[in-house]
Amino acid sequence: MNREHVLPVQIGMIAGSGMLPILVADGIRATGRKVVCIGLRDQFDAALPDHCDVFSTAGVLQIGKWIRILRRAKIEETVMVGRVGKARMYEPFRVLRQLPDLRAALLYYRRLRFDRRSHVLLSAVADELATSGVRLIDSTTYIPEHLATIGLMGKVKLTAVQQRDVDFAWPMLRSIANLGVGQAITVRECDVIAVEAMEGTDAMIDRSAQLCRTGGWALLKTAHDSHDMRADVPTVGVPTLERLASAGGRMLVLGAGRVIMLEKPRMIEVADRLGIVLLGVSI
């Protein structure tokens, strides 16, 4: 006998920093479901608890505690959203400060000792959750309206020079992303200014401003062609545009369906006001 799939009434959320967890929580609640959230200690936004139905905290490396909280609430599906500064993984005495629990320590020993790349880490965490009956789902499931779309998203048109930069840099960015190097590059007049690595997009924008003082350059950002959308989805927001403009950038090119735009309508308004081309490109 076929049974109709019953959607869960509660969705779990493991939340890092930034406003993305707030948007996701609001998106979940807009569907009539409740949000059972685990805020990662010293990471989550102070306003987040007010957007959730149930809220707890746990350390970044306390996977066993995550699972206990989710199972106690009878959660079957969860999302993982928000930033966790990867550079913090390399700080002195990081293990003592993060206080990993036994489950995290065993996971590290068995699967992550020699390879801590983002997709390997995500796969290991997802499998660990799955062994306890909790499925990690696409982090963009409840915020499709915040994803970049194909074509111009604002009123500022591309120049011929900017179109050549897109044609030149986009295949290169995809190769860089697919190699796991980074998710963004900056270019001007078919010349690469900077490539993003562990420092993140903001630091790369600042570096590009120093390297190209004449301005007029473009920032391109996307995810790996087969990027696992369950976590670590590239994200931009109004602060990205403002930082880009003050650093001399004049175009933001995003992978359509691969990059989250925080407060997308406001981003488009700000891009128009600042005279920045806002373009979505299909992979």
Image (tube, helix red, strand yellow):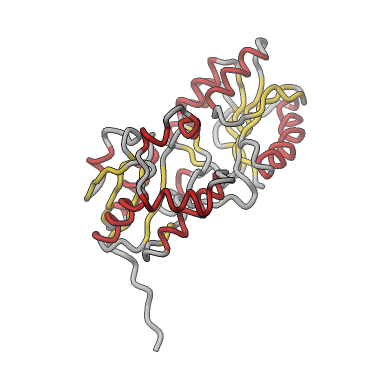
Residue at (65%, 41%) from the top-left corner?
177
Residue furthest to the top in view is: 213
Residue at (62%, 33%) from the top-left corner?
184
Residue 206, quarter of the rendered image: top right
Q: Position of residue 57 (x, y in %)?
A: 27, 43
Residue 6, quarter of the rendered image: bottom left
Q: Position of residue 114 (x, y in %)?
A: 58, 45
Above or below residue 207? Residue 74 is below
Q: Position of residue 82 (x, y in %)?
A: 41, 40
Q: How many discs appear?
A: 0
Q: Is residue 134 left or right of residue 109?
A: left
Comparing 213 with 196, the one in front is 196
Residue at (37%, 37%) from the top-left corner?
98
Query: Is residue 22 visible to us here?
Result: no
Q: Is residue 217 left or right of residue 89?
A: right
Query: Is residue 186 visible to us here?
Result: yes
Q: Is residue 193 left or right of residue 49?
A: right
Comparing 99 with 169, the one in front is 99
Comparing 95 with 59, the one in front is 95
Q: Is residue 261 left or right of residue 251?
A: left
Residue at (30%, 43%) from the top-left corner?
58
Comparing 271 with 34, the one in front is 34
- Image quadrant for the N terminus? bottom left
Q: Position of residue 12 (x, y in %)?
A: 32, 54
